[in-house]
Amino acid sequence: MSAMPLFHRLLQRWPAKNPPHPLQVLLDQGKLGTLYQPIIALQTGEIDGHEALARGHSGTELPPVLLDSAQAIQLQTELELASAGLALQGWGYPHTQGRMYLSFSAATLATLSETEALSRLHELFQASGVPCKRIVVEVTNHRKIDDLAALARATTALQAQGCAIALDDIKASQRSLNLWMQLKPSIVKMDGRMTTDLQNDPAKAKVLRSLAAFGFKTGASLVAKAVEDADNLRIVRDSGVQLAQGRFLGFPSPSVVETLNLRARQVLTEKWAPHDPASQPAELIATDTGPQGLQWFD
């Protein structure tokens, strides 16, 4: 599937304006692209995969601009499919290791929930040559979705094709946990606020350990986002979280990386530090319906 015709379809439905539409500028100047940020397996230090991030030539974060434009002209689905196609084309398969993490909004996946529509996504994967077992579909913007049944149909169908499903920006809230239980993802990416300043917030670190235990019970691997320094990496690793990403582990780059950087490898090879029960709140309990006692980030 060619990405350019889809973007041109976006522009054809946009009335002529001055200044030109942002999508037109990106196309005319050739500034639309993809950056890849590594996701690391904390047990081994190996590259689990890369998240594809739509960016401009200068590294500007473009997704909000592009998605807002697409929503205004009712072609959000087309734009997200085009962005995924660009990411897959630039990934370098089969000469890359790990998995490709592709972001799709919950609204787009719900739109693609019917068999005929979902085949467009499968055809996109086939055209790239990347097998579904190497693709992780990240569900984003799920707080805005109304039709959870349609979203569940789409994710179930993608899982049947061999894709892994990841829930992005999960918080320690009942709503997030309910969605987790309903969609049964194999990967859960936590809200970045849950992994910042952990060294100064023992209560938050405790919640992190409880979520990691719940993930183990449900068969989901947790991804800690926004890991920006060595101290946070140590706490995330010692909490039982399986995967992590952030600038300390690797910056977004136009090309994929094959090995973890030295500074992060040194942290991961350190001896694990046991927790001091006397200095921490009581353990939260992982139950079949979620960890009990979570009150953060509702």
Image (tube, helix red, strand yellow):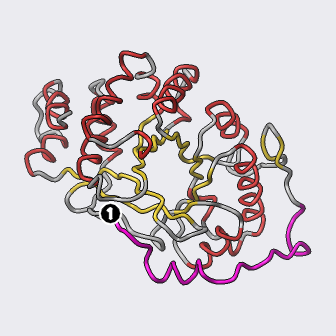
Q: Relative to the observer, which residue lies in front, 140 or 268?
A: 268
Q: Is residue 67 above or below residue 231?
A: above
Quarter of the image for residue 195 reads bottom right
Which residue, given by chain and number where applicable, does mark 1 sit on? 256
Query: Residue 252 at what x, y percent from top left?
Result: 36, 64
Q: Is residue 33 left or right of residue 161?
A: left
Answer left or right for 142 relative to 213: left
Q: Nearer the viewer, residue 176 or 286?
A: 286
- x and y percentages locating residue 212 in the rendered image: 71, 55
Closer to the camera in the image, 271 or 282? 271
Check the picture and name the quadrant holding the C terminus: top right
The local secondary structure at tag 1 comes to loop
Tell me if residue 224 comes above or below residue 293 in the rendering.
below
Q: Which quadrant does the N terminus fall into?
A: top left
Residue drawn at 20 percent across, 50 percent down: 32
Q: Name the residue located 31 percent from the left edge and 41 percent from the top edge.
A: 84
- Which residue does the image show at 10% across and 38% down from the upper left? 18
**Segment colored magenta:** 257-282
Which residue appears at 46% of the width and 44% of the height?
A: 136
Quadrant housing residue 177? top right
Residue 113, position as x, y percentages in the image: 45, 21
Q: Position of residue 48 (x, y in %)?
A: 48, 59
Q: Is residue 61 above or below residue 82?
A: below
Q: Is residue 91 above or below residue 269?
A: above
Residue 272 lies in the magenta stretch: yes
State the image quarter where residue 65 is shown.
Answer: top left
| Amino acid on which disc 1 is placed | Val
Is 9 positioned to the left or the right of 141 in the image? left
Magenta highlight on residue 285:
no
Pointer 1: residues within 10 angstroms few (<14), some, or many (20+)? many
